[in-house]
Amino acid sequence: MTSDAASVEIDMESGFNTKTWAIRIASIGIWFLPLIWIDPTTYIVLTIAGLAFGMLLFMVAAGMTIIFGLMDVLNMAHGALFALGAYSGGYWILNLLEKFGWVEYGTAVQSFGSLLLAIFAGALAGALLGIVVERVIIRGVYGDHLKQIMITMGVLYVMTEVTKIIWGASPEVVLVPMMFQGSYDIFDVIVGKFRVVALIVGLAMFAGIQLVLMKTKLGLIVRAGVENREGVQAAGYNINRIFTGVFTVGAALAGVGGTMWCIFQEQVYPEIGLENIIFAMIVVIIGGLGSVTGSFLGAIIVGLSFNYVAFLLPKLAMGVNILIMATILLIRPWGLMGKE
Amino acid sequence: MAESILSLKEVHTYIVQHHILQGVTLDVTAGRPTVFLGRNGAGKSSTLRAIIGLNPVTSGEIHLAGRPIQGRKPYEIARLGVGFVAEDRAVFYNLSVEENMRLSMFEENEQAWNRLETVLDLFPDLKRLWRINAGLLSGGQKQMLAIARAFVNDHRILLIDEPSKGLAPIVVDQVGESLLQIKDKTTIILVEQNFHLASLVGTDYFILDDGRVVHQGLMEDLVEDQALKQKYLGIG
Amino acid sequence: MMINDMTPVQRDRLREQQTKYNRPSFWIQVALVVVLILVPLVPSFRVMDMVAKIMIFTVVVASYDLILGYTGLLSFAHAMFFGIGAYSVALLCYHSSSPQWYHLILAVVAALTLSVILALVLAFFSLRTKAIFFAMLSLALADFFHILGMTWSDLTLGEDGITFSLPGILNVEWSGVNLLGVHFTPRVMTYYLILVAAVFLFMGLLRFVRSPVGRVLKSIRDNEQRSTALGYKTFRYQIYSIVFGSSIASLGGILFAVWLRFVDPESVLGVFSMVDYLLMVIIGGLGTLYGSIIGATFFMATQAWLPDLLKGIAAFFPDYEIIHRIAERWMAFLGLMFIVAIMVFPKGVVGTVREIIDRRKASGAG
């Protein structure tokens, strides 16, 4: 009865297990493998770029995986929230602020201010659409995976068209605030300034999510809900309100992700939502459905590999996600931190 | 005249199209530990789930201390003073013992922490395992934690669904011990297949069959009544 | 064999065989095929074009229904299999200077081989875990092939797509033949090729769902635990269905490319075209096969008339620019239709009608 998976893990931790250590060393060592073909300076540049890219992926995947873990909803409409965040935060707000001269040639304070405003607007837009999607669309299909995926895919499809109605079908340029243009040069290591920003925002987001999950009562309820929703209800908590709350937060995170992403890419287009939801989905699968830490690791893995491969074998870069996903699923069918 | 803490009147529930409860009527007296008995599928657990609101009540009335509670959400009913220890998974495996207890507290105030102290005095094992994940506890310890969890709030009634299920006989005795310790602190309503445990804890009983109450009375009478036990419980 | 020696299933089949020609549904089918044969007599290319596409998509949607409706698995890779078929014929005909018949046969072989391999890989990775893994992995794979079609320009010419010519009497340069006062152009010949192939494939699908395998699939969909308990290896049956359905989709893709003589990544590999497929299968009704005829017809008709209709409406409001912009995005309306269909009409047209008939029968018998 008591010897379930968790207690086995404890045994492995306490004793020195050669196999576990071999896996750990191999999984860290593999990231130094590209050094055989890439000179160290370029390697560092690529690594930082890869980590920044990974953080951007994490921003999208985080909300998706939390929503799946707690509510058992695979929300493809998350891509629509992302796209709306990109358009309203990254494109609309920055263009608006540019009229006051805040963005392209703004002072340091104005640059920071416009970035913060853009992020805030992205989060707000994502959250507002998220509430509507949860209340109107997802409420009706709780518990039915197939319908959820179909209907949220429909929402993403419609929202992509709505985006075209509002902002047009062709790609638009997204402005980068003055402070974050260009790059730092540290001993010949060239690092894009906005990459550093992306890294910081991504890390802050991860730390914030972990802090809330591990240190607050709300986090406690959410973690309990991931395990057993009925138990949380019977313990006296309104699970529906928690669902809406978590969904809204996840939607806001997607909005922030969209804003950051489009500033990073310096452009925005309607299909951005579909493209990124597939990226995020791969990250979530690699990390294990429902695990925030898993998604964080998955995002870093995808971000780094994508950058190394894109440098070494540009043609293969697009397929590398699929390859990583297949490899990880071969070893662990439930993903890195996934549970049955 | 003893006070009725919980009364069900003609309660019907459906799951999909199956008619699970077909008019359950019963009265539980405050302060008297009550046991629901009956064969598998007789509707005992479903009655508990109907009381806490996890199974929607199609028709009929449920009163908690005179107040109607049918049709309310589970969390509302829990906050009105109904504790529920589910059949399995009554504890959260991925949370520590501490977190399990904190999750059960509606408000984390001084009163609740004091109450927790009292509960932990009843279950010293849990104090020792305070920071361990509940998934690593033994079957008996999990069941103690489940009961302790239900105890940190001042519940009027405590619904416990088959606490002996899947436990070794010696552990069942431990669980029985702990139930005896708490039985005068609240009104326990117990669903139990293990007749020994049921007769140890219970004062009143209801026998359910095919989603209805078919017999009720005092536990001490039932222990003697071989014919009745044979008929509905297949023992004796 | 004496009738008494037969198993109940065999007896049922025999009865079905004997009464086959007396049932109205059989004659409806015959009438439908006759109408389809006569379509090229209508002197309108638009009509023939639409009917040909309806036939192709009926087959594709029916094969999708096999996977979604009969097996209960949501695949986002159906468009990918369709695209693989379309591209295999396009690439072979384009990259050979003068396409021959054997190129078409080669395309069929290539499309089927690739489809079977990919379907097996997909099944292997996703069916070991939760059912939603199938949806997610198929989406990732489909997206990969879409990107491949867009970026591997040496081979696929990228976003611009491939225009190619066909061999023999399907080639536009063939002068055609006059028979019984009717002029049979290469277009008409292509139409008949599609008609024969579509009827053949649709019958194959009907056969499949009525076979013992099909019956097991239905029982797995309705109650996987019970079927496993009965000793069926659910995994194996799901693979049969995925492989068979996906292969038919790739053949449908071949027909589509042969009809258009043009392929591009957006129209045959686009991930969002899965929403079109889903709309067709939902409108028709899950688990009905025949519903796919209704679904495909509805979709093609809507696709043909909706843009004009919206433009017509917008013309009443010349001063409101926003209305014109909305009218341009007719696909948004298809998407809305899809969402509404899932919410209020989950069993589709054929499914709902069938349910009403069943209920009436049940109450009549009771």
Image: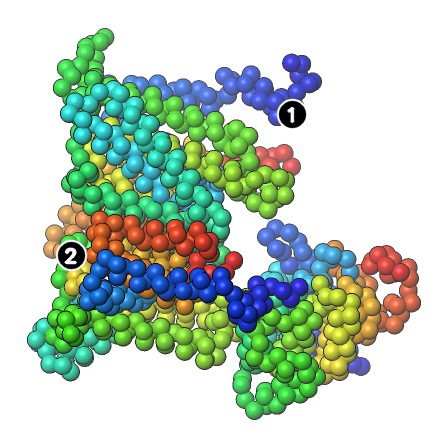
The quarter holding residue C279 reads top left
Going 32% across and 62% down the picture, which residue do you hit?
A31
Question: Are circles 1 and 2 on residues that touch, CB within 8 Å?
Answer: no
- Helix, strand or loop at label 2? It is loop
Q: Is residue C171 left or right of residue B186?
A: left
Residue C31 x %, y %: 38, 20
Q: Is residue C108 left or right of residue A224?
A: left
The quarter holding residue B155 reads bottom right
Residue C8's disc is 1
Residue A228 x %, y %: 54, 66
Is A180 located above or below residue B47 in the figure?
Answer: below
Whether residue B190 is visible, yes or no, is yes
In front: A33, or C22? A33
Residue type at numbered disc 1: Pro
Going 44% across and 75% down the picture, which residue do you hit?
A213
Residue type at numbered disc 2: Pro
Q: Chain of mark 2?
A: A
